[in-house]
Amino acid sequence: MHRRTLVHSALAAAVLATAGLPAFAQAWPTGKPITYMVPFPAGGTTDVLGRLIGQKLGTALGTTVVVDNKGGAGGSVGSEIASRAAPDGYTLLGGTVSSHAINVSLYPKIGYDPIKSFSPVTLIGTNPTVLVVPANSPYKTLKDVVEASKAKPGGLASASAGIGTSQHLSLELLAFKSGVKFNHVPYKGSGPAIQDVIGGQVDMMFDTTVVAAPHIQSGKLRAIAVTSAKRLESMPDVPTVAESGIQGLSDYSVLSWQAIFVPTGTPAPVIDKLHAEIRKILAEPEMQEKLKNFGMQPADMSTAQIAAFQKAEVDKWAQVIKAAGIKPE
């Protein structure tokens, strides 16, 4: 009798716990298509990752994942649309360091709170930038660069893919932490910017490893330092900024990153299921190879760790943007 009572009690508790969940959380996914919002135009890294992950995720969940591109304002337009979607597990958002850490301090009104409006699901991966100079540049170390910028009125000229990009903010964080001034020269994209660095029209540039690596390997550019906390496997001879020994730079780190979010209020069991399935997808050798081809370092964080990481990123870039007086284009 005692054992039977315990069994009935356990079953009753399970029923009550399940009854406490919304009906759609118990049944999710039902076969209804899931929208994977990409807040950037088609063809970019966020879009390509969304399509790769979305196809595999749809198969794993027994439904269809449809990628919907809503570009504009550095990812803010699509993110705002996603923030207003029903929190039912049928809307995912491909977020980045721009849309979910930088834009809130860069743009006066973005229509959403990068932390309060979303719950993190997965951190797909991170991508540092690398400081490069022309192959014939006299600068061989970060100390050379900093000392030369101190000595030159207005500082050394540093190109970027545009105001508020990871390339630009890598420079501004260097200036902020070292106390040294640089002359920021924004371009409309990495392509023309890095060509002017190769040609010697600009002294230097921070750029993603994806863009810079081929030019480093061909001998057109010299790599000075990477912005990750540790040296990269693909560039083992290139020191980190933190290794430079320059005062104030011991904790320097800049990572561009890709993540997946859902609107706040999405049931925890749904988030847990998404997190687990996407982790399996990202762990596949094929996906690991594709991430490396993007120049990305795979990341494996719990949702709580992602939330803490994101908050630290928001706080860091708010401080840098304010100190540098950066305004959107």
Image (cartoon, rainbow, N blue to C red):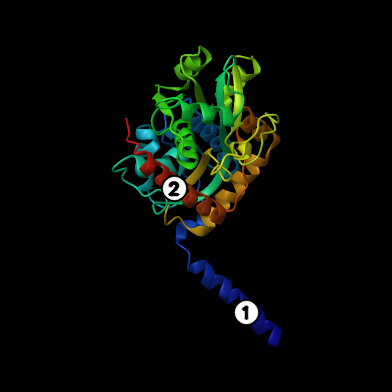
Q: Mark 2: few, some, or many residues within 10 Å (few <14, many ≥20)?
A: many
The residue lying furthest to the top in this view is 199
Left or right of 65, for residue 217: right
- Residues 33 and 102: in front is 102
Q: Which residue lies under the disc numbered 2?
A: 314
Is disc 2 placed on a helix, strand or loop? Answer: helix
Which quadrant, please, contains the C terminus?
top left
Numbered badge on residue 73: none
Quick one: label 1 or label 2, which is nearer the N terminus? 1
- Residues 109 and 173: in front is 173
The residue lying furthest to the front in this view is 151
* Three-letter amino acid code at the position of disc 2: Val
Residue 55, by quadrant, is: top right
Task: Give the total of numbered labels.
Answer: 2
Is disc 1 placed on a helix, strand or loop? Answer: helix
Left or right of 234, for residue 28: left
Q: Mark 1: few, some, or many residues within 10 Å (few <14, many ≥20)?
A: few
Name the residue at 64% across, 31% down. Answer: 292
Q: Is residue 164 above or below residue 267?
A: above
Q: Position of residue 327 (x, y in %)?
A: 32, 35
Name the residue at 43% across, 38% down. Answer: 98
Q: In the rendered image, is residue 1 in sight? A: no
Residue 328, by quadrant, is: top left
Name the residue at 44% across, 50% down. Answer: 315
Q: Is residue 20 above or below residue 310?
A: below
Q: Which residue lies under the disc numbered 1?
A: 8
* Three-letter amino acid code at the position of disc 1: His
Name the residue at 56% across, 54% down. Answer: 305
Q: Is residue 240 above or below residue 276?
A: above
Q: Position of residue 97 (x, y in %)?
A: 47, 40
